[in-house]
Image (cartoon, rainbow, N blue to C red):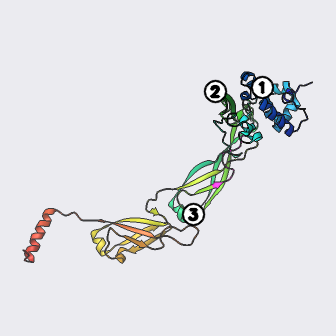
């Protein structure tokens, strides 16, 4: 006949409901807390830990069902860790008493709290490089990539922390008792461990395996550098049954263009010309994605290298509109090299010619 000492520890019947178990634990926790027993702290700490372990099992529906089925002895041998469950005592009391409850700050002086990010796994951030042509035409690409899945057959709840990812430790600080949650050294805070099985058909004992996946990246033309797009549930994959997959976040980075420099929706085009060409003009051809712009620069008059010249509606598309930015021309004038001696001789000749003194 199996024994069920956890119920005896809390002083409740085996068919007690969750409210009865909670009330019993609350009463015993107040009675046996070390701060309430200054003359016998060691015994109180041991008792307090025992009843906390009992409550952590009996208040968890899955663990209680397994315990009721196996009893004390078989529950220990089952590899489920028996009664040493290292409960998150902070969470137990916060749930039961609300914050620090009836005990005040002298009862619980929290140094560390487990961050609660819900049941969603982490997101994966990746940079996707695109060209200025992609900005002009828009992006519509099928992306192929691999997702790392965690093997449900080989990944099990950590025996040391019972899947919590943390271990609670009681530390005496003068008249106060601190309860500190620390990451479990056995699972590095993940709450799960790999039960290696080289015969596993999915992961071959590695605990994880990759699957091929694909998604469609569709971005309208005219997008800005650094724009992000999110693919739901294609990020980190669950290790536990109650977790949801994270997301894949792609950040688009625009590569430098060989011809243009982008400024907003305008395109800057730099052109080298001679001094003669800046005065008399020159036919030029500017490659413009799927087109070629042909102009003669004499339409701008004599070129001033400190000015910018505009060709309207020849820039990049403005996102979600049918408009475009402008093309901005910047001219770099190459001046002829002149020997200073030649300048002096020319000055003498001109002075004589015009009888200038």
82 on left or right of 212: right
**Badge number at residue 138:** 3
Label 3 residue SS: loop
| Crowding at mark 1 (Cα within 10 Å: few <14, some 14-19, many 20+) | some
Choose top left, top right, bottom left or bottom right for residue 267: bottom left
Label 2 residue SS: loop
| Crowding at mark 2 (Cα within 10 Å: few <14, some 14-19, many 20+) | few
Choose top left, top right, bottom left or bottom right for residue 9: top right
Q: Is residue 21 visible?
A: yes
**Badge number at residue 47:** 1
Choose top left, top right, bottom left or bottom right for residue 217: bottom right
Label 1 residue SS: helix
134 on left or right of 121: left
- Dot 1 or dot 3: first in sequence order is 1
Query: Disc 2 to disc 3, how far (Cα)?
Result: 66 Å
**Badge number at residue 174:** 2
- Dot 2 or dot 1: first in sequence order is 1
Q: Residue 161 appears at what percent x and percent y?
A: 72, 32
Name the quarter where the C terminus is drawn: bottom left
Query: Disc 1 to disc 3, how far (Cα)?
Result: 68 Å
**Badge number at residue 115:** none
Q: Residue at the right extreme?
A: 1
Let me know if residue 235 is in the magenta part. yes
Mark 2 or mark 3, which is nearer to you? 2
- Dot 2 or dot 3: first in sequence order is 3
Q: Which residues are drawn in magenta?
A: 230-240
Q: Nearer the viewer, residue 274 or 226?
A: 226
Q: Relative to 75, does residue 344 appear above or below in the rendering?
A: below
Q: Is residue 88 visible?
A: no
């Amino acid at each position: 006949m199996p024994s069920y000492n956890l119920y005896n520890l809390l002083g409740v019947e085996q068919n007690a409901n969750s409210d009865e178990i909670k009330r019993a634990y609350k009463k015993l926790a107040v009675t046996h807390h070390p701060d309430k027993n200054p003359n016998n702290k060691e015994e109180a700490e041991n008792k307090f830990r025992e009843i906390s372990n009992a409550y952590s099992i009996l208040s968890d529906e899955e663990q209680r069902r397994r315990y009721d089925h196996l009893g004390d002895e078989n529950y220990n041998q089952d590899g489920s860790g028996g009664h040493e469950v290292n409960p998150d005592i902070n969470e137990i009391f916060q749930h039961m008493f609300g914050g620090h409850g009836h005990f005040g700050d002298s009862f619980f002086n929290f140094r560390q709290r487990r961050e609660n990010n819900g049941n969603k796994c982490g997101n994966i951030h990746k940079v996707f490089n695109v060209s200025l042509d992609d900005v002009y035409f828009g992006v519509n690409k099928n992306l192929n990539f691999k997702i790392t899945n965690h093997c449900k057959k080989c990944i099990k709840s950590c025996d040391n922390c019972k899947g919590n990812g943390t271990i609670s430790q009681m530390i005496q600080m003068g008249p106060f008792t601190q309860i500190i949650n620390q990451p479990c050294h056995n699972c590095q805070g993940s709450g799960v461990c790999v039960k290696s099985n080289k015969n596993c058909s999915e992961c071959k004992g590695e605990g994880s395996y990759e699957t091929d996946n694909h998604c469609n990246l569709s971005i309208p033309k005219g997008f800005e550098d650094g724009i992000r797009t999110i693919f739901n549930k294609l990020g980190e994959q669950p290790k536990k049954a109650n977790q949801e997959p994270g997301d894949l976040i792609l950040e688009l980075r625009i590569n430098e263009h060989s011809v243009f420099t982008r400024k907003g929706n305008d395109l800057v085009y730099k052109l080298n010309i001679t001094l003669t060409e800046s005065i008399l003009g020159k036919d030029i051809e500017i490659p413009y994605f799927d087109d070629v712009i042909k102009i003669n620069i004499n339409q701008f008059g004599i070129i001033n290298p400190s000015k910018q010249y505009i060709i309207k509606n020849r820039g990049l598309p403005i996102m979600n509109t049918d408009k475009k930015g402008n093309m901005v021309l910047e001219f770099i004038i190459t001046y002829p090299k002149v020997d200073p001696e030649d300048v002096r001789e020319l000055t003498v000749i001109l002075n004589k010619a015009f009888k200038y003194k």
